[in-house]
Image (spheres, coloured by chain):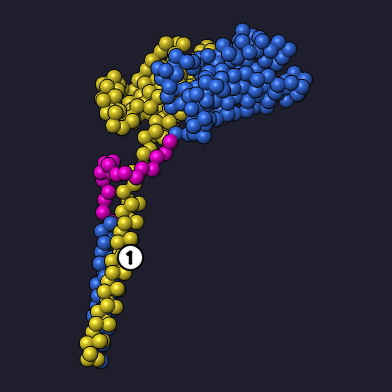
Amino acid sequence: MKKGVLGEGMMNVISLLVLVGILVVFFIIFTKNIDYSNLKNVEEIISSKKINSDGGITLKNLLNTPLENVNLYEFIILNKNDQEKIKNKVNELMKDICNFDKILFILEPEKICSWNMKIKFSDETINLEGGFAKSSEAKASGISQQDSTNKFSYNLNLPDYNNNLVNIELGFIKGT
Amino acid sequence: MKKGAYILSGELSLWINRILLTIVVFGSVLFTIDQSLSKDIEIEESIADMAIRRLYYSSSCFASEDLSSDPGVVDIKKFTEKRLVNCLTKKYPIRVRLENKNIQISNLKSFNDELNICKVQNKKEKCLFENEQYVLVKENGNLKQDILKVEVIVK
């Protein structure tokens, strides 16, 4: 009986010591200053990647780009019936923004770029594409792997001269 | 077997279990805390991205301003090294170039030295961040298209 009482007493003492030990360790861990530079070699990394979008700036600027006496949007609605003219003009402007071909794919594959534009009038749709856009080439390059992180698109609804809405959508798939 | 000996051995095995359990719990708590404290947060890319966007979003930098700020439209009068320093300070070396206008400015005269150091270091850790943005340049009230190329070094 005496040993039992002694055991219970020891248990209480050891429990208290363990509790104090835990508190001391917690105190040391949470009050010590952590030198940020010492965190560099740690295996686990939380990464905050940049947001892969441009906030619609490219589409806005593209449509506002002046061409002689009009901007690109006005040029599009004025030449609605001449799709070739629209395609040539948009391709010409997009070459500065998203230019990519087979040679660049060999030299700088990480800078891959592909774009597509849909211009939806009330009665018809014009589809344009460029950069590294051909599906067979894109498949061969593994571009689909980048889709989830580097793909973004924006669209705008703007009125034409007859107050019908024209929807313009510009999509990109971009590398780093 | 004596009754006292049985009580002692019974108590001993009970204690061994208690101690082992305490060690396991204690170890798990320490491991969990250590894991969360030892995480390295990489924010360099986000810092660079924010600095780059500020250039053409903020009227304190290059964004044109009429009644309100016009993001994506660069006022050519604002495109100066002095304004670049005031806007983004000298904390991160930055070089900005308007491609069609062929104008290049930097917030540090020693940008090339910083770039060389970064390129050596770049094998271990990325420190150079680049971006190209289609912008419109406002000059004497007229707009012209251009490409704003930005290089930022964040260490």
Left or right side of B32 for A80: right
At x 29%, y 73%, the residue is B17
Q: Pick out the residue farthest to the top.
A: A68
Q: Residues within 10 Å of mark 1 (few under 14, many from 20)?
A: few
Residue B77 visible in the shown view: no
Quadrant including the N terminus of chain A = bottom left
Left or right side of A61 for B16: left
Residue B128, position in %: x, y? 35, 27
**B96 magenta-colored:** no
At x 43%, y 22%, the residue is A109
| Residue A109 vs residue A8, the one in the foreground | A109
Magenta-tinted stretch: A30-49
At x 52%, y 23%, the residue is A138
Q: Give the residue at mark 1.
A: B25
Left or right side of A101 for B16: left
**Chain that bears disc 1:** B
At x 30%, y 61%, the residue is B27
- Secondary structure of the residue carrying tag 1 is helix
Residue B5, position in %: x, y? 22, 87
Chain for colour yellow: B
The amino acid marked with disc number 1 is Val
On screen, residue A20 above or below A139: below
Q: Quadrant of residue B119?
A: top left
Residue B107, position in %: x, y? 34, 23
